[in-house]
Image (tube, helix red, strand yellow):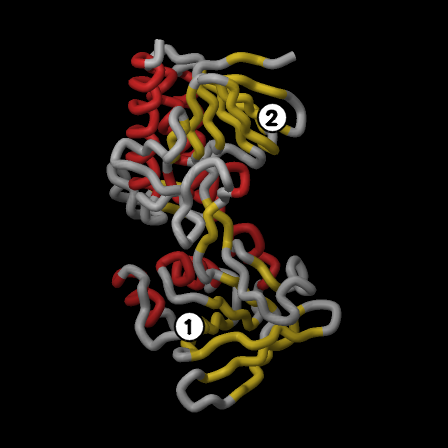
Amino acid sequence: MKQTYDVVIAGAGPAGLSAGIYTGRALLKTLVLEKGMPGGQILLTDIIENYPGFPEAVSSFSLAEGFKSQALKFGCEIIQDEIKKIEKTGNIWTVTTLEKEFSARGLIIATGSSHRKLDVHGERQFTGKGVSYCATCDGAFFRDKVIAVVGGGSYALTEALFLTRFAKKVIVIHRRNQFRAEKVLLARAKDNEKIEFMLDSVVREIKGEQKVGSAKILNKINKKESEIEIEGIFVSVGMVPNTDIVKGLVDLNDKGEIIVTKNMATSEQGIFAAGDVTDACSNQVATAVGAGVEAGLAVNKYIEEDK
C-alpha cells in the first residue's frame, strides 16, 4: 500500500536533513529516504574544522547525529531504503523504493555525490585489498606501512594528514604542481615529516598479487614512468553527483549535476534539489546546509501555492 506524505526527501546528508528540519517546522509531513547511514559523506571524515560555530572543530559523527536528531524532533520520518524510480501523475509524485511506494506533492533530491574513480588497471581488482576511498574507514589497516594518496584538493590532503596517524609514510600523488586545497591544509601537509609529494604525476597502473604492492607512475613533464612500492592507495580525485534516479527527469549540466535556480528549483515543477548533487554548491557542509534550508523553504511555498 502506498504511503502518502507532503514531501519526500532523497538523501539524509547535511542538505537533506537541513531541508527536513525546515519542512518539519512548516508542519509538512516529511519522509527522508537514505540508502546508507544518515549523515552522508561527512561520515567519511574524521573531524570538521570549518563548520561555523565550532571553533575547536567537531567530529563528523556528532554533527551528523545533531542533524538527524533535530530533523526527528520536528517530525521527520527517516527510513533506510533505496529509491529505484520516480514518476508523476497529475501533481503527485510516486517514489518507488526497493521495499515500498510513497507519494508526495513535493520532492527534494539531496543524494550527494560519490568518489570519482581513477579508471586504471588494477583499481577495481584491488578495491578492498589496498585500494580505498575513505581514510577514516580503512586507515587503521595500514599501520606502519607505506601508502599513497592520489589527489590535490582539500579532501585529499585531509585524508593524507589523517593517514599519518597510522602509516610509516604517505606519498601524495598529484597531477599538477599547484594544489587546489585550502592553504592551511597544504601548510600542515608540507610540515608533516611523514608526507612526501610526487607532483605533475599520474597513476597509470596499480599492481600486486593478493593485495596492492606497487603503482606505476607517469611524470607528465618528462614522460618518464616509475614504479613505487606501496601497500595501499587512497583515491581522492573528486566526486561524481548521484543523479541516476533523476536522469531524464530534470535538466543536468555537462558534469551530471542537477541545474537549479536560486531557490533550488529544478526544471521539473515540484522537484527541488540541494547539496553536492546540484550545480549550486561547493563540496562543503556549510553550503549544503544552506541549500537544504533554501530547498525546504521553497518546497513549502510551492505546496502552499499549489493548494
Q: Whole-percent x and y of residue 35?
A: 58, 34
208 sits left or right of 148 in the view:
right
How crowded is the residue under tag 1: few (<14 C-alpha within 10 Å), some, or many (20+)? many
Can you see residue 133?
Answer: yes
Question: What residue lies at 61% left-to-right and 14% top-to-bottom?
Answer: 2
Q: Label 1 belongs to which residue?
A: 174
Disc 1 secondary structure class: loop
Horizontally, residue 19 falls left or right of residue 79, namely left
Q: Position of residue 228 (x, y in %)?
A: 56, 81
Residue picked out by circle 2: 96
Amino acid type, callout 1: His
Total numbered labels placed on residues in the image: 2
Q: Residues within 10 Å of mark 2 (few under 14, many from 20)?
A: some
Quarter of the image that includes the C terminus: top left
Q: Secondary structure at mark 2?
A: strand
Q: Position of residue 215 (x, y in %)?
A: 59, 77
Type of the residue with mark 2: Thr
Choose top left, top right, bottom left or bottom right for residue 64.
top left
Q: Residue furthest right?
A: 210
Q: Is residue 277 left or right of residue 187?
A: right
Nearer-the-camera pick, 136 or 80: 80
Query: Which of marks 2 and 1 precedes in the sequence?
Result: 2
Location of residue 32 with respect to 37 vertically, above or below? above
